[in-house]
Amino acid sequence: MQIALILAGVLFSIGGVSALYRIIRGPSLLDRVIATDVFIVTIMCVLGTEMALNHHTDSLPVMLVLAAFGFVGSVSFARFMAQQDEA
């Protein structure tokens, strides 16, 4: 079990650092938005793993807020880009 936890931690860390790198480096705004979505999903996966291991649901509202934030952010960006394409 400990090896699985260490492996999951390493993989979540690699995913988070990779997403942060893409947020910082870009090169385009679309890359940054997608990387932000990946980072939010990575955080949600970490919270879900922690909840499963500790047998509680205390972090569920945080996960729901993160999911809503990611969805609203993506939809807002898509609408913004659609308006720019029309102009």
Image (cartoon, helix red, strand yellow):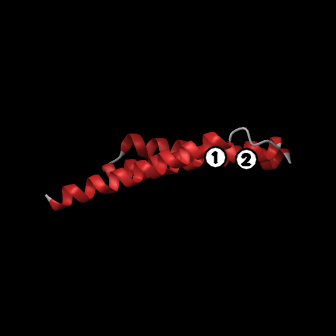
Residue 6 point in image, percent of width and height: 76, 44
Q: Residue at x 41, y 48 (%)?
A: 73
Q: CA distance from mark 1 to mark 2?
A: 10 Å
Name above or below for residue 62 compared with residue 73. Answer: above
Q: Quadrant of the rendered structure where residue 84 is? A: bottom left
Q: Dot 1 surroundings within 10 Å: few (below 14), some, or many (20 or more)?
A: some
Tally the marks.
2
Give the labeled residue for mark 2. 49
Asked if residue 3 lies left or right of residue 65, the reply is right
> Residue at (64%, 46%) from the top-left corner?
12
Left or right, 19 with respect to 11, comes to: left
Residue, disc 1: 12
Circle 2 crowding by C-alpha within 10 Å: few under 14, some 14–19, many from 20:
some
Q: Residue at x 82, y 47 (%)?
A: 3
Label 1 close to label 2 by CB (< 8 Å): yes
The amino acid type, in three-letter code, at marker 2 is: Thr
State the SS at label 2: helix
Q: Amino acid at mark 1?
A: Phe
Look at the numbered disc 1 and give the secondary structure of its residue: helix
Does residue 14 appear anywhere in the picture? no
Query: Which marked residue is nearer to the observer: mark 1 or mark 2?
Result: 2
**51 and 39: which is toward the camera:** 51
Q: Quadrant of residue 10?
A: top right
Of the image marks 1 and 2, the number of the one nearer the N terminus = 1
Residue at image coords 41%, 53%: 74
